Image: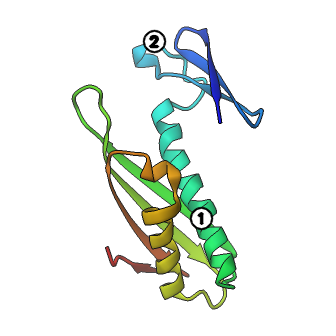
Amino acid sequence: MEAKVRWQNKMSFEAEVTSGHKIIMDASPDVGGENKGPRPTELLLSGVGGCSGIDIINILGKMRQEITSLAVHVNGTRAEDYPKKFTDIHVHFELEGPGLDPEKVKKAAQMSMEKYCSVSLSLNANITYSYEVNGTKYNDW
């Protein structure tokens, strides 16, 4: 796996990844950017959401659970001092589907966040997670 990142101008960069996709990243105007794309830190949080979402779909599919909707909300808190790394990340899964078993959703979330999601497991941050099924919130962690 590889990403080739090229400077475009000012604070804008274009990344081309192994799969051939291109992503524009930029900084905010207050630090010289032009807001042409997401910040690299936003992409990191998005990667946590995408990675864990893929896990949830795969795991619940194997458990024969029907999912009609999945949203993954990822919130991160960064340190105030450089390197301003993420210190805390919270992942909240919102799932809908007829007959979805909350215990199976809990198990899928645990498996993703504690064993399979290579993005979140690569980070040195305190990562917590919660879930809701058909509008009912569960916060067992």
Q: Is residue 126 above or below residue 44?
A: below
How far from the left and from the top, in percent, is residue 46? 54, 46
How far from the left and from the top, in percent, is residue 131? 45, 73
Neighbour tally class for label 1: few under 14, some 14-19, many 20 plus, Cα within 10 Å: some
Neighbour tally class for label 2: few under 14, some 14-19, many 20 plus, Cα within 10 Å: few
Q: Residue at x 31, y 73 (%)?
A: 141
Q: Is residue 135 visible?
A: no
Q: Quadrant of residue 81?
A: top left
Q: Is residue 7 above or below residue 104?
A: above
Report, in whole angstroms, how far the alpha carbon at label 1 lies from the one at label 2: 37 Å
| Residue type highlighted by circle 2 | Gly
Name the front one of labels 1 and 2.
1
Q: Which residue is mark 2?
A: 32
Residue 87 shown left or right of residue 29 in the figure: left
Q: Residue at x 55, y 46 (%)?
A: 47
* Along the viewing direction, whichever of 53 and 42 lies nearer the viewer: 53
Q: Which residue is mark 1?
A: 55
Direction right: furthest residue: 20
Residue 79 shown left or right of residue 138 in the figure: left
| Residue type highlighted by circle 1 | Asp
Looking at the rendered structure, the number of numbered marks drawn on it comes to: 2
Circles 1 and 2: CB distance less than 8 Å? no
Direction bottom: furthest residue: 99
Q: Residue at x 66, y 69 (%)?
A: 58
- Whichever of labels 1 and 2 marks the residue nearer the N terminus, that label is 2
Q: Quadrant of residue 99?
A: bottom right
Q: Residue at x 43, y 52 (%)?
A: 121
In what element is the residue under mark 2?
Answer: loop
Q: Is residue 81 visible?
A: yes
Residue 98 shown left or right of residue 125 in the figure: right
